């Protein structure tokens, strides 16, 4: 099935949601999970500063052939790091060609590394230095849509690297003129999201910005105080490339803006998230449904076409379009690029519970319908 001609749309409630794969590593705490662009691998970051790669080609092939049996999800390879793993991103045009099987990762006090998925070798390193000639650690990283550039966010800078040229960035811009200035983008850059036409970033101070391709700030806005928490921790473009969605820590809302009119949010989805941990969300291929993980282990599917302008008073405890995916907080969630397969990962620290719930990474088969794009 070609992804260029067909898209899937979740139809939750029409049939049961089935778990088709599960990892057996319950001693780790998952932080984030992402499908590879070709849909054959999963990358999951964990609390022990390890990036785990799972080969799910067998499960995807079985699903495509109509077989929905349960199978174990074994680690294909894992990359352990001496410092804290701050972020990672798949090469956007990854396919069967081994040359495209790579990802970029950011580790504290290290340059960005472009790493080969199969061999684990570092193909290239990219480093940025501040005015004191000190190496800066990228707190957010993302590829450009065409895969030619890498965008990295730092405490006070946004940088763009040429993938084919190791070393310093091609462009490096300050996010604010000075610490005392009220202009620019204030705070540590926590997220970067790109699409075919725009580059967006967000900070731990609750601000968001759109950037030009050379990292200059085009406009800045803030999460409204009634929806904001203590900083944006997840940022994602909707498939229509017009709406940008943001989730904040210590906030119970996921907020969306139409970049054609940034005066006020265009949609708000309630999601209990009174935690400092990052919690991801994901869209189906059509962009109509938003899959949201909750702190109690549930995943709720929200029909964005049925949202009012403000959903702040909508109860979610008994939402019929939900499933109990885990026994603990759903930190990672990602939708397959071609098939209605949803990856979820759980985990959070429990300081006063001697017997916390086991954590795992699971792949779910979600009822869906296909249509020609």
Image (spheres, rainbow, N blue to C red):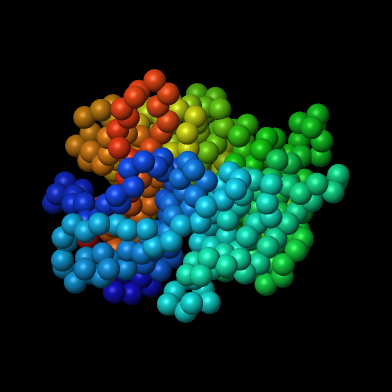
How many circles with numbers are drawn on the protein?
0
Left of 220 or right of it: where is 42?
left
Left of 53 or right of it: where is 68?
left
The N terminus - image quarter: bottom left
Q: Is residue 249 above or below residue 306?
A: above
Q: Is residue 95 above or below residue 328?
A: below
Q: Is residue 91 visible?
A: no
Residue 31, image quadrant: top left
Closer to us: 287 or 120? 120
Left of 191 or right of it: where is 129?
right
x and y percent of residue 87 in the render? Answer: 55, 49
x and y percent of residue 142 in the render? Answer: 58, 56
Residue at the top extreme of this rendering: 352
Residue at the bottom extreme of this rendering: 97
x and y percent of residue 233 in the render? Answer: 52, 38
Closer to us: 14 or 65? 65
Residue 365, image quadrant: bottom left
The C terminus - image quarter: bottom left
Residue at x-position 23% and y-position 38%: 324
Residue at x-position 26% and y-position 42%: 325
Residue at x-position 23% and y-position 34%: 319
Q: Is residue 249 above or below residue 332?
A: above
Residue at the right extreme of this rendering: 132
Residue at x-position 68% and y-position 51%: 110
Left of 76 or right of it: where is 169?
right
Q: Is residue 343 visible?
A: yes
């Amino acid at each position: 099935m070609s992804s260029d001609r067909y898209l899937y749309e979740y139809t939750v409630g029409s049939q049961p949601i089935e778990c088709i794969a599960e990892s057996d590593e319950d001693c780790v705490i998952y932080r984030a999970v992402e499908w590879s662009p070709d849909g054959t691998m999963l990358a999951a970051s964990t609390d022990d500063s390890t990036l785990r790669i799972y080969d799910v080609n067998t499960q995807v092939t079985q699903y495509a052939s109509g077989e929905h049996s349960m199978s174990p999800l074994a680690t294909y390879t894992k990359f352990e790091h001496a410092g804290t793993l701050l972020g990672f991103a798949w090469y956007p045009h990854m396919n069967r060609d081994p040359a495209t099987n790579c990802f970029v990762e950011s580790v504290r006090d290290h340059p960005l590394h472009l790493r080969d998925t199969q061999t684990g070798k570092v193909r290239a390193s990219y480093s940025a230095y501040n005015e004191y000639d000190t190496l800066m650690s990228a707190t957010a990283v993302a590829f450009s849509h065409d895969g030619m550039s890498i965008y990295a966010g730092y405490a006070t800078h946004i940088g763009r690297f040429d993938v084919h040229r190791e070393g310093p960035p091609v462009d490096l811009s300050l996010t604010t003129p000075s610490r005392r200035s009220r202009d620019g983008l204030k705070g540590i850059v926590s997220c970067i999201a790109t699409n075919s036409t725009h580059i967006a970033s967000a900070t731990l101070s609750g601000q968001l910005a759109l950037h030009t391709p050379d990292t200059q700030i085009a406009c800045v806005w803030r999460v409204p105080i009634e929806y904001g928490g203590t900083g944006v921790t997840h940022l994602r473009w909707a498939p229509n490339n017009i709406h940008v969605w943001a989730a904040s820590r210590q906030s119970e809302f996921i907020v969306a803006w139409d970049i054609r009119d940034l005066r006020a949010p265009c949609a708000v989805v309630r999601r209990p998230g009174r935690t400092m941990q990052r919690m991801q969300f994901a869209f189906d291929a059509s962009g109509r449904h938003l899959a949201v993980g909750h702190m109690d282990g549930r995943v709720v599917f929200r029909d964005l076409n049925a949202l009012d302008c403000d959903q702040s008073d909508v109860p979610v405890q008994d939402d019929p379009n939900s499933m109990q995916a885990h026994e603990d907080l759903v930190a990672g969630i990602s939708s397959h690029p071609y098939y209605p397969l949803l990856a979820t990962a759980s985990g959070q620290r429990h300081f006063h519970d001697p017997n916390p719930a086991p954590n795992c990474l699971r792949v779910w088969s979600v009822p869906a319908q296909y249509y020609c794009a």
